[in-house]
Image (cartoon, rainbow, N blue to C red):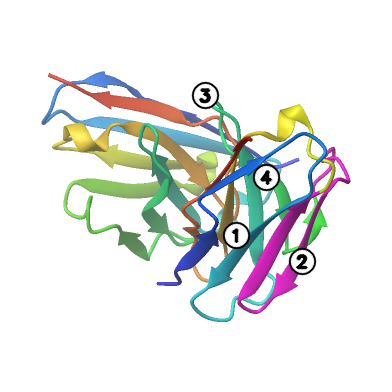
Amino acid sequence: DIQMTQSPSILSASVGDRVTITCRASRNIGHWLAWYQQRPGTAPKVLISEASTLQHGVPPRFSATGSGSDFTLTISNLQPDDFATYYCQQYSNYVTFGAGTKVEVK
Amino acid sequence: QAQLVESGGGVVQPGASLRLSCVASGFDFSSFSMEWVRQAPGKGLERVAFISFEGSTKYYAASVDGRFTVSRDNSKNTVYLHLSGVREDDTAVYYCMDQFIRGQGTRVTVTS
């Protein structure tokens, strides 16, 4: 199985900050990586697919890069709605999720 | 637009059985493998079961192998997860997915 290592597990930030979350795959997954946002009590929502493609309706302050085994999600100008937990997920070989990054108020 | 709608969850006692369903729409369901994942309260996302597009290949997480069974009916655009001998640590929201989680999930609570 492909393992996904996500860091940090907790990220403390303030409104207006620029934050970056990283995800590393245990082997090459090409660009088959998605990023999700999950707010408490709701289902995960896909933000980005194919490593860098923003889903319809996702604000452009979200961006992502990477290929192969190293990926990043960046949120520029952090907004109050962005305090949530973020997961990466590979879909190159079955599916595997990272352990999640909680973005909390500093 | 692709959609997945899960149902069938509920509150059950340890040892009980139940069947979860997931109805797909907006894409060619019969061409896609499907997976079930779950999220226990306060925890991350755990892969539970996989079924190939035609249903001939199935894989299970070690934690559910021998207790859960995945199946599909391509004529109904539906994938199922049959849970038997449930335990309290099976308590979770269960999501079906093709490549992505698209639905709201269905909650299973196992309690005596």
User: How far apart are the alpha carbons under marks 3 and 4?
Assistant: 16 Å
Please provide the residue range marked out in magenta.
A55-75
Disc 4 is placed on an element classified as strand
Q: Amino acid at mark 1?
A: Ser
Mark before the other along the chain sequence, 4 or 2: 4
Contact (Cβ within 8 Å) of mark 3 with mark 2: no
Q: Quadrant of the N terminus of chain A?
A: bottom left
Q: Residue at x 50, y 51 (%)?
A: A9
Q: How many marks?
A: 4
Residue position marked by numbered label 4 in the rendering: A46
Query: Which chain is indicated by disc 2?
Result: A
Mark before the other along the chain sequence, 3 or 4: 3
Is A73 colored magenta in this rendering?
A: yes
Splitting the image into 4 quarters, where does residue B80 fall?
A: top left
Label 1 packing within 10 angstroms: few (<14), some (14-19), many (20+): few
The one nearer the camera, B69 or A31, is: A31
Label 2 packing within 10 angstroms: few (<14), some (14-19), many (20+): some
Mark before the other along the chain sequence, 3 or 2: 3
Q: Are marks 3 and 2 on the same chain?
A: yes
Is B32 colored magenta in this rendering?
A: no
Residue position marked by numbered label 2 in the rendering: A65
Residue position marked by numbered label 3 in the rendering: A41
Disc 3 is placed on an element classified as loop
Q: Position of residue A3 (x, y in %)?
A: 44, 69
Q: Residue at x 57, y 44 (%)?
A: B101
- Is label 1 or label 3 in front? 3
User: How far apart are the alpha carbons under marks 3 and 2?
Assistant: 28 Å
User: How far apart are the alpha carbons under marks 1 and 3?
Assistant: 32 Å
Residue position marked by numbered label 1 in the rendering: B31
In the image, A97: left or right of B93?
right
